Image: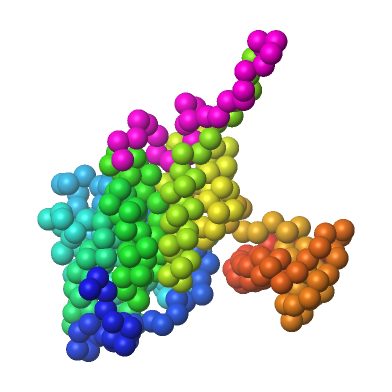
Amino acid sequence: MSQKTPRNFFKPLAIGAPEPMRDLPVKLERMIHFVPPHLDKVRAKVPSMAPGVDVILANLEDAIPADAKDAARAGAIEMANMYDWQGNGTGFWSRVNPLNSPWFQEDVSELVLKAGHQLDVIMLPKVEGPWDIHFADQYVAQLEAKAGLTRPILFHAILETAQGMALVEEIALASPRMQGISLGPADLAADRKMKTTRVGGGHPFYRVIEDPKEDGSARASAQQDPWHYTIARMVDACRMAGINAFYGPFGDIADLDACEQQFRNAFLLGCSGTWSLHPNQIAIAKKVFSPDPDEVKFARKILAAMPDGTGVAMIDGKMQDDATWKQAKVISDLADLVASKDPDLAKAYSGD
């Protein structure tokens, strides 16, 4: 059996561990901003940066040199105590090293025992199957009990291998700790043996081309998104499990136009948010993963015309029914969540 039975699914895995959550907290998570905790200058900026982002993540894995792992772990624990994350509503996450690394157990034990009171989510890289989640689940439950935590820490998996992709539905359902899954395009591309060195985004060689023309003139072609299938399948797995899907990193921090387009594609396909690797990507994520005010106004017209979600209404020359009511509800609910944190967008959504 690959997972706990339904009757036992929501039972704590250790004596004294907190009760697992039956529903995810409703939180705005448009961007997960990555911070290298071993760098003193960057870490010092965290308290001033925190109010302007939805989630700050202390990164302990890729991009942290092997000889800086201990310093990064200590820096992450310092970050937990630099700001009142729980009181101010900004998410505090940490990406630990993979389960097969020599740093995983110390990463998790130090974080839970010394920073668990502020830590919302542990991001688990290179998850290959539900067994990875089960191991981490049991281990964290024991640490939560030891630390006396009353609120469970959630898990966020990164999709970085072909095997993980093949088992994404099982991973999404593996534990009530599961908060979401992010696409990890660089490692996944390497594991699939894709012929690209890009971190996310399109590729100039991945194109469609129109049929030959009788006059022999140039044929139009258009660059395509090689991540479309992967993101769509990840979104389906997450929504089926009642958790959130996220786009991961966009590596070319200088190409803001391409970054915005990749984020927008992910948003339209159902992702709740994305990663920001550089401060210049924060504003893009905030813009893209907040619904457009005109879309919000139209969605609320639909909800007002069909208060109980049934029937048919003609609005601005377009037929609306119970299916479009559900679509409108998704946009309106997200707008309410965004408005609770962003006064400017709250005004735009209300028409003031």
**What residue occupies the far front of the structure in this picture?**
214
What is the chief secondary structure element of the magenta stretch?
loop
Can residue 320 be seen here? The reply is: yes
Can residue 93 be seen here? The reply is: no
**What residue occupies the far top of the structure in this picture?**
216
Q: For residue 302, which quarter of the picture?
A: bottom right
Residue drawn at 75 percent across, 73 percent down? 303
Q: Which residues are magenta?
A: 192-217
Expressed as whole percent of the image width and height from the top left, the position of residue 6 reads: 33, 83
Residue drawn at 69 percent across, 56 percent down? 292
Count the marks: 0
Q: Relative to 52, is 122 on the left or the right?
A: left
Q: Please name whichever residue, 117 or 95, is drawn nearer the observer in this view of the structure.
A: 95
Expressed as whole percent of the image width and height from the top left, the position of residue 98 reads: 22, 56
Expressed as whole percent of the image width and height from the top left, the position of residue 304 reads: 80, 75
Magenta span contains residue 306: no
Image quarter (top left, top right, bottom left or bottom right) of the C terminus: bottom right
Expressed as whole percent of the image width and height from the top left, the position of residue 256 reads: 54, 38
Q: Please name whichever residue, 247 or 284, is drawn nearer the observer in this view of the structure.
A: 247
Indicate whether 141 appears above or below 344: below
Image quarter (top left, top right, bottom left or bottom right) of the N terminus: bottom left
Indicate whether 293 appears above or below 89: above
Indicate whether 351 appears above or below 185: below
Residue drawn at 18 percent across, 79 percent down? 142
Q: Please name whichever residue, 289 or 74, is drawn nearer the observer in this view of the structure.
A: 289
Q: Relative to 3, is 225 on the left or the right?
A: right
Q: How is the image coloured?
A: rainbow
Residue drawn at 12 percent across, 55 percent down? 102
